[in-house]
Image (cartoon, rainbow, N blue to C red):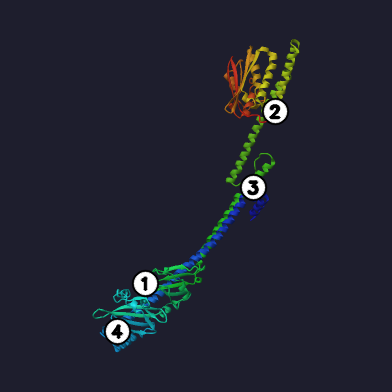
Amino acid sequence: MKWVKNYLNKFFDSGAHNSLAVRLWSILAMILGLLAVTFAAAMIMINLNTKKENTIREAETLINGVTATINGNIANYKDISRLIMINQQVMKFMRADEVDPGLRNDTIYGVNDVLNVCNSIDSVFIFRNDGEYISTGKGIYYIDHETMNTGVWKEEIYEKLGGAIIRMNGNYAVFRQSGDQIVTIARAVYDIYSQKRTGILLMNISTKMLATAVGSIENADVCIVSENGTYLAGAKDLADLFDKGYCTGKIVHKDNGDGHFHMVSGYKPDGLPLIILCRVHPSRSRVPIMIIFVLLLLLGAFTASLSMLASYITKDINGPIFELSEAMEDTKRSGWLKKIDVKMPDNEIGQLADSYNSMNEYLQEVLNRLIDKEKAVQRVEMRVLQEQIKPHFLYNSLETISYMACEAGADKVYSALETLGSFYRNFLSKGDREIPLKREIQIIRDYLSIQKLRYGENINDEYDIDESVLDVMIPKLILQPLVENSIYHGIRVKGEPGVIMISAKPENKDLVVTVHDTGVGMTEEQIESILSETEDDGEEDALSGFGLKGTIRRIRYYCKDKDAIRITSEEGEYTEIRLKIAMRSNGEGE
């Protein structure tokens, strides 16, 4: 888009490589990167979770199927064992007082007639209460008579009252000499007429029955082991993963810990001395396509939202901000405060531009006022200098000295000339606008000494100056106009001798200077008129109003406080002008 190109050109031309825009796009890039990583992690987690759930579900299905098959086979073998118990030849054998070879053979034939219907029965043992027994089947067996004669071995069978119990290897009393494992169905035999217990039946089933139950399973490894972990049938390598944790009576799922996703599930069927182990091949598990589609849709929607947000911020926020900043820089380079003439949107950025223009107008107005005040103060200072340097003051002083030359000796003339030179030397002060208080006091002393040459004993001066404030800096000639005002508009008008008293002392962090004269005084209206300040006070008024307005304006400008000067007076008695100036010592010395 064109606006993007223009924006990028402005951005790179401005050198704002650490601007808000850079940070914004960096953050967006990090967010997109985080989203990509999160998406990949979510896919991995979902895939693993889906594999796990599918593996668990398939393992439980397989285990339940194998359990159902084994339970079905066991149920059939239980029925066969019941048929053997009620066989006529077996009942004769169990009831006979004495067992002869003929009865033993007949009983064996009777049992074999029943066993002909099933090939998985490995052998049958029938034990009478007196210890006599018969056996039929395949292979050679070892009988642990000592174990069989223990009360524990028999009691477990007797407690079932003719019901079947399933144990391994004749409840660990009958073993094949070959070492092959057998599953034994044990029953207590009861006479059907007298209901007396006549002996015990042991039917031993080959583990081929278990192998048949797991032999047709595909895409999974199934293994059957005994309660102590002895391998019976199925995938032999799974037997090494057996532990007692699978003997809880419910399906247990465990990771085999080989670093791959190979979950091994185990289950001990109720009433069977067997543990069924199952390992489903995880390659069959896949993440549902709908989940992938939804995640991709969410990722795309979020990415599009971020792109729209970034475009909006770049176009409607960063762009106007760059334009506003460029306009401000142009104003700065111009060296003068002026309005910026850039079209801004009607939002907070536009308000910012309007505020900047308003601030410039206000600053321009303040600067103009300050310049006008500075000019006015300079005019006042110049008028004060002119008043003291203009010829009539100098002529009057020289005329007085000439008169003294005729009437008095050379010493007084020399002293008068020295005082006049000291006055002008301190008065001009090398152009300084601020001088220490002690120099201003010296100007007053010299000025009054010169005036005394004309007015003689009509003017007396007194001083009360605290030595701690002598080095405090004050505006030059801030007191001399007040003393002059006391002479010409106070004491001289009164027509009788008067006193001018000057005091200076610290008060908190301020310097307080008082000029007190015993002249004609002023009315309240005169005081109010002098202290009032209007915008149209012109140059001619600066020294009018008893010679105070210009000095008052200087004091207020210097102190930034309208209350820096106070005037108290009583007509015919006195006038007192009190100044309060913030103390600032002369750091460079006199």
Disc 4 target residue? 90
Question: Which is nearer the N-term, disc 2 or disc 1?
Answer: 1
Q: Quadrant of residue 421?
A: top right
Q: Is residue 477 visible?
A: no
Question: Which is nearer the N-term, disc 1 or disc 3?
Answer: 1
Helix, strand or loop status at disc 1: loop
Whole-angstrom CA distance, mark 2 to mark 4, is: 143 Å
**Residue 17, which numbered label?**
none
Residue located at (26% from left, 83% from top): 95
Instruction: Please state which amino acid type lies under the numbered disc 2.
Output: Asp
Where is the N terminus found, in terms of image quarters?
Answer: bottom right
Position above or below: 382 against 354: above
The answer to whether mark 4 and mark 3 are in CB contact below 8 A is no
**Residue 432, which numbered label?**
2
Helix, strand or loop status at disc 4: helix
Q: Quadrant of residue 167?
A: bottom left
Whole-angstrom CA distance, mark 1 to mark 3, is: 82 Å
User: Of tags 4 and 3, which is closer to the observer?
Assistant: 4
